[in-house]
Amino acid sequence: MKPLQEQKLWMYEKMVESRHFEDLIKRAYFEGKQPVFNMAKGPLPGEMHLSDGQEPCAVGVCAHLAPQDSVTATHRPHHTAIAKGVNLNAMASEIFGRANGLSGGRGGHMHLFDKAVNFCCSGIIAQGMGPAVGAAMASKLRGQQHVAVAFIGEGAANQGAFHETLNLAAVWNAPVVFVIEDNAYGISVAKRAATAIERNADRAVAYGMPGVFVPGNDPDLVFDVAGEAVARARAGEGPSLIEIETIRLEGHFMGDAEGYRPEGEKDALHARDPIKLYRARLENQDIPPADLDKIEQVAKQRVSAAFEHARQSPAPVSEDAFTTVFA
Amino acid sequence: MEKKRKLTIAKAMSEAIALEMRTSPEVLVMGEDIAKLGGVFGNTQGLLDEFGPDRVRDTPISETAFIGTAVGMAAAGMKPVVELMFVDFFGVCMDAIYNLAAKQSYFSGGNVTCPMVLMTSVGGGYGDAGQHSQALFATFGHLPGLKVVIPSNAYDAKGMMAAAISDPNPVVFMFHKALQGMGWLGTVPRSITHVPEERYTIALDHAHIVREGRDITLVGLGHTVHLALDAAAELEGEGIEAEVIDLRSIAPLDRETIIRSVAKTGALISVDDDYHSYGVGAEILANVAEQDDLHLKAPLKRISYPDIPVPFAPEMEHAVLPNAGKIVTAARKLLKESAHV
Ligand SMILES: Cc1ncc(C[n+]2csc(CCOP(=O)(O)OP(=O)(O)O)c2C)c(N)n1
Ligand SMILES: [Mg+2]
């Protein structure tokens, strides 16, 4: 399944949007944290996990999804949220802990919920997998054609929930797609030191579903493989597992000294920045650079406006902490 | 005079583990990011270099597997020290903790012990939201067969870690992120203390009176010990002498020390940063309320974290966490009202 030109441009736009989002986060995160880095300080306290480099995973998969389809994402959720169409202003506000954020500042960057596009994420490894099967089964039991996608990191494939969920999804023939973003690390631990086999896609065999490895962090290849898996799910043919080779261009979280990376790895990764590579490909396919510039400009403006919106939005009041615990 | 060695809790913990590892080949360390990185919270720094990858093991993100493995190792006579990075993650592996580790001795009639330590970080206050900021003391303290301890300073951390590793029982060794001494988290300076170089132990079943006073007893653990000490300093300016007890352990709970103190002061505020209902404060207050010969001059009071998930936005989180001001206000009120009785 090859992307049409307009789908390619959409993927490019969403990748740029996502990267610019992270770039603005980077600037805001260090406000109030200098000269002494203290995670508690500044407009963005707490951990911050950036998605730089992993954009192809999000856009290649979400290009096939409608708002009615569900996505569960991880502690590293911004690229996925943006590709799924989460309300950008409300998302920025939430990350800044503002009263008009997605959840009124209760959740923050690891707990983004947007019911309008059926998106959620969470901070516990592999935690979204069960809920994705749940969303898929709800659709199936109601006779709808909506699918669900669970995004996880490669580290999550060693969590018990991964194996239980794959088995259950297969037994119940759930319309779900499991997507592993393999960025080669779980915090400081290299995948090869923690995972018994080379390719997590091979684990699909144990659960009787297709498992496909997508090399090269390539949006078009992800689009192709994800398209088949989503179509399969929609057609009632059951779950699939996709493993995408990707790269994490930043630390595990902001402030990570990354001493665990081999010398020179960071430079080599930046040379493979998927957004630059994709732009070069699009230019080679005779898309005028001016058109791409325009797309970039619009995407970046949208993000900048969202940050402006967030910064100017009011903070919650302390009493808000006590509401919504129960429905 | 002895040279002062000011250490953080993180450093004190790793030093204590190293001392045990040098003398006991049975001791080993396992967990996520504890080897190469030295622990996300620094408490295993230097161990990989000294003891090598056989005894200092980075694990996959498979808590059920490696904590279960630790139980098996302990049954086989080893002394594993394992880390659950944040206590909030216990949900994926509690079975190994409370149905295996905690019950091994009992189910075997005392024939199979479980000498393991489960280190885990607790606490919020730095904007990490509801899955990375909980204290959950009571969740663990409720379960028979587990010892549950938390140091408030580096000196205690070292002695308590040595005691925990030597203990034949599973010890949940909590450490509070606000005290850990990681630069990136900020640290209560009082938690950084002199730590002797040599090995020593601190009994895990004794609370510690860290400040004496005759007017009111303030009980805390981990971070709230410091809140209570700050409050006591402020109350002193008003002529109120507060006694501050550092629990050090909630299981077993040193009931005697609390009761003796309240017998002296006649007033009690317990302060903890775990959820309010069915919590540490409830146990401490009940323990005092059950004494029939205690003369109380004021109602018993607990300050804790309300029964809500931890919110992200600082405007909400900071408002709902316990702090010294809340303790001072409560103490004033209790003692003022008691003066009119
Ligand atoms: C159950 C559980 N264990 C441990 C953690 C701590 N933790 C947060 S992110 C992370 C690494 C995850 O690696 P991976 O799944 O590959 O995702 P990545 O961070 O690379 O995107 C770990 C161990 C957690 N959040 N939940
Ligand atoms: Mg990873």
Image: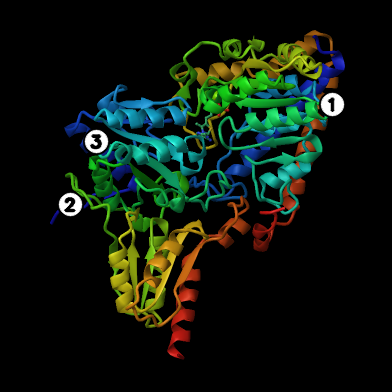
- From this view, report whether residue B73 is shown above or below residue A241: below
Q: Are marks 2 and 1 on the same chain?
A: no
**On-image quarter of the N terminus of chain A:** top right
- From this view, report whether residue A201 is shown above or below residue B202: above
Label 2, label 1: how far apart the Cα atoms are: 75 Å
Residue A229 location (% of width, % of height): 74, 15
Q: Amino acid at mark 2?
A: Lys
Residue B280 location (% of width, % of height): 43, 59
For marks 2 and 3, the one nearer the N-term is 2
Q: Which residue is mark 2?
A: B3
Label disc, if present, on residue A143 of the rendered structure: 1
* Element under disc 3: loop
- What is the chain identity of the residue bearing mark 2? B
Label 2, label 3: how far apart the Cα atoms are: 45 Å
- From this view, report whether residue A28 is shown above or below residue A204: below
- From this view, report whether residue A136 is shown above or below residue A205: below
Q: Which residue is mark 3?
A: B111
Q: Nearer the viewer, mark 2 or mark 3?
A: 3
Label 3, label 1: how far apart the Cα atoms are: 57 Å
Residue at 59 percent across and 52 percent down: it is B309
Residue B242 location (% of width, % of height): 35, 75
Residue at 41 percent across and 74 percent down: it is B234
Say whether mark 2 is within 8 Å of ligand 1.
no
